[in-house]
Amino acid sequence: MIVCTIAIVPGDTLAYIPSPRAAQAPSPQSQAAKIPPDQLDSLVAPIALYPDPMLAQTLAASTYPLEVIQLQQWLARNPGLKDKALADAAMKQPWDASVQALSALPEVVKRLADDIQWTTDLGNAFLAQQTDVMDAVQRMRKKAQDTGNLKSSEQQKVETRVIESKSVIVVQQANPQVVYVPSYDPVVVYGPPVYPYPPIYYPPAGYYAAGMAISFGVGMMMGAAWGGGWGWGCGWGGNNDITINNNNNFNRNSNVSAGNRNSIGSGNRGGNSNWRHNPEHRGGAPYRDRNTADRFGGTARGDSLSNRQAKARQQVGRQGGNLASNRGGGDGVSNRASGTGLSGRAGGGASPGNRAGGGGADRVGSRDVSRSGSGNRDAFGGGSRGSSGYNGSSARASSSRGSSSMGSRGGGGGGGGGRRR
């Protein structure tokens, strides 16, 4: 069993450090077995119907789970920030541009942060099997389209296109300047799953308008938050890439700011480029398998305690010791965990460098990272969880949904972004 803890390392920096028990775990194989298609389908089900730019940004941000948690806590501490003030303050935080830009999408932040294990599994799967994950999105869109639940509306435009001899379903905003976050129950829009859907919160059946399987929140103006257009897009085709708009406010800011390099090719200050994962924003969180870890110079689940601690401190050193501190944030708020429960040392106690207070060890926010008592989940996250991924009892597929992590639907996380319409 592999158990990990969020710990404070020198420089007031949050890092993903294993507990001593992890030191006895066996080394992972060079490359974990691939996640099969039916499990990938279920993994992407909650976000597959997002408009392409939102989908691409969510996939990129999911590869930085610790920064997603930090963003949620930062939003909760700064509920008064709106519109341009929110965007400007978020850009001063030491996070990846994909995470910074989520500050204007509190509903998406809540969904990702409230079930951080699913988010971590999604990001790990995307890094290890990017093309397979994008293909899974297309399969789920086709299912929703075949059931009559994915179609154009006043909030979105749905088209079937042929790109590089490949038929794909493209989802875009109906109005490029207005963003709507779709909400839906996968069982309703796709039909019963072959493999259980992730056990995250889905609105009850009565939540939707008559005859509608997908609900949309209040439209949000992109405006000052994204300036220069949305920063991420899906490059459907042979490589299933995520594309980056380097003229987007967040990408442009990260691309030219010293010490906060974005996942963009160096020197590319305009136009579009392909997204690349930046391990400096990983915070020491382990990758799913040794092959992925070697690609990005990180650690994998099952690595020894000393190896993972050393890698975490290397990443801290590359960031000047300030990966999680609020470098020039402008709002006067330290970026430490306040009351929401980033647990610290192995004993879970608070210290001057770790203000988490009541958080226990092996937790990210209110979520148990170790999952030591929740069955096998290895198909999505690696480690000692077996090949079955989410098991049936924990997934609560079909009708038993609505009581897990997300709570009531709404703005979430504090701080909204953009002007509401």
Image (spheres, helix red, strand yellow):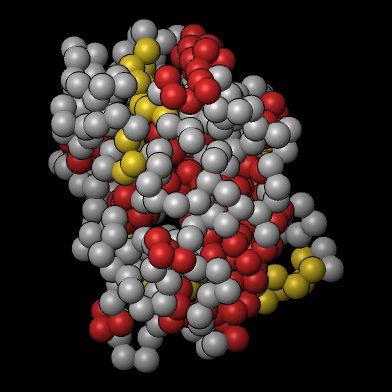
332 vs 213, nearest the viewer: 213
Query: Residue at 40% of width from left, 74% of height from top?
Result: 185
Quadrant location of the C terminus in the rendered image: bottom left
Residue 154 shown left or right of residue 190 in the figure: left
| Rendered position, 386 above or below 282 | below
374 vs 325, nearest the viewer: 374
Task: Count every numbered label the image shows and give the total.
Answer: 0
| Rendered position, 227 above or below 364 | below
Query: Residue at 43% of width from left, 81% of height from top?
Result: 188
**Residue 235: percent from left, percent from top:** 68, 55
User: Do we see residue 197 in this rendering?
Assistant: yes
| Rendered position, 350 above or below 75 | above
Query: Residue at 46% of width from left, 66% of height from top?
Result: 392
Residue 363 shown left or right of residue 127 in the figure: left
**Of all residues shown, which one is farthest toward the bottom?**
211
**Residue 162: percent from left, percent from top:** 77, 71
**Residue 393: percent from left, percent from top:** 41, 65
Question: Which quadrant of the view contains residue 263?
Answer: top right
**Residue 7: percent from left, percent from top:** 35, 21
Query: Residue at 70% of width from left, 50% of height from top?
Result: 34
User: Do we see residue 258 in this rendering?
Assistant: no
| Rendered position, 238 above or below 125 | below
250 vs 132, nearest the viewer: 132
